[in-house]
Image (cartoon, grey):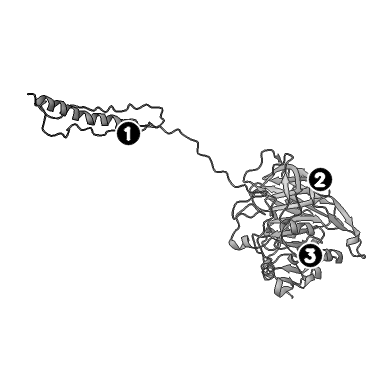
Amino acid sequence: MRRVIPFLVLAFAVMLVPAAGASQNMPQLLQVTLPPTNTLVPTPLVLFTNTPAGPTATPSNTTTPTATYTATATATFTPTITPTPTNTPTPTPTPNGPLIYPEGVNSLTGLPFPDEASQNRRNLIVKISNYPPIVRPQSGINSADIVYEYETEGGVTRFAAIFRSQTPEHVGPVRSARLLDLNLVPMYNALLAFSGASDPVLEMIRGAEWRFQAISTAFGDNCDEAGFCRFPNGDLAFEHTLYLDTRMAWERATERGINTGYPGRGFAFSDFPDANGTPANDIFIDWYGQTDARWQYDAATGRYLRYTDSQAHYDAADGEQLWVDNLVVIQVDHVERPDLFEPESRTASLDILLEGQGFAYVFRDGQWYEGYWRRRSTNPGDALMLLYGDETPIMLRPGRTWVAIVRGFGDVTISTEQADMVGTGTTIAQTPTLTPWPTPTP
């Protein structure tokens, strides 16, 4: 019995050794840092016992304790965090002008380029006659992305048609350049196709930084190499018989290494008209009784149709009346420059000061908007901008735009009612008969 008692004391002490060790390791097993949560999950209680295994308290001769403690510190307290709903931000659409345009969109129209070729070629300005009336109907105007109409001299107008999206084979009659073109070329970083100019203006073009962008019969560009061909017509004077194949003009530019698809930034486009418009369905512009233009809104197509000198004005290439999606009228200062015209001329050359800013009318979707035009710099590609007084852009309808330049808005009459142009009986006189073009004369 005396032997048994010491042995029990010894066994009991041995069994306490693991318990003491366990007390040192307990922080590793029980001290679990809970993740932050609004729901407190109770930590499972882990119990440890020092009671030796076996049915009796009779000590064994082995000194290995049988008391085990399974580490259950991997408590199953999976956080039940309920995610907070968040508002998914709506992607901001890429602005469609006046300075940034979506990838693959033509800055002249706000529409996607029809193909890769149109995206890669350069803006092309072609000078087209509008006087005398016998030159009408002209060809290829409805294929232009933008058309500028401005006074040349004596109250008659000329067109500067800018092409990019389409490649008409027959554009004209092609006529001479004017001082305004020296502004339009850098504005649209464009090529300029024209028949000639007064000697002073030609010298200014030869001295311009963009002189190699000029394609003209005056510089030796001809029918076989550049697409300037004569199409004789018994009713037309020689100067009204020159037409241009735009495809060949672009090929000429490619040969010179200057046919790069630069944008002309300035217009802003939206499918939806601005909310502050005034109804306007008939716009009449008078250039001192020598030439006039009337634009009437066609609600069925959303386009504006043109009448000139009280007659429906057609395009001889497609047989359609001249049309645009947007009509812009801008007031610009005109300065006479008799020093830049031939001495034998009876009228002075006009310098239309398309720099800085001035007043503007914008017409789209049968609505009229008043604001300002601005040319923010003379850097290449800084084209005409249209703005409200608070500097926000006036939104054009994606499509084709006509810009009419006037001396003052007193020459512009705007009405909600349309004049009866069909009743004039002059429409048939201008309707073109689409026949094959005569053989060109180089």
Q: Secondary structure at mark 2?
A: helix
Q: Which residue bears the numbered disc 3?
A: 175
Q: Compared with residue 205, is residue 77 higher up or lower down, i.e. above or below? A: above
Q: Residue furthest front?
A: 2
Q: Which residue bears the numbered disc 1?
A: 28
The reply to whether the C-beta atoms of the residues labelled 3 and 2 are less than 8 Å apart is no
Q: Residue at x 41, y 30 (%)?
A: 36
Q: Position of residue 408 (x, y in %)?
A: 83, 47
The amino acid sitting under disc 2 is Phe
Q: Earlier in the sequence, mark 1 or mark 2?
A: 1
Q: In which image quadrant can residue 263 be found?
A: bottom right
Q: Compared with residue 223, is residue 132 higher up or lower down, i.e. above or below? A: above
Q: Earlier in the sequence, mark 3 or mark 2?
A: 3
- Quadrant location, the C terminus: bottom right
Q: Position of residue 41 (x, y in %)?
A: 34, 27
Q: Count numbered badges in the picture.
A: 3
Q: Which of label 1 and label 2 is nearer to you?
A: 1
Q: In the rendering, which numbered label is found on residue 409?
A: 2
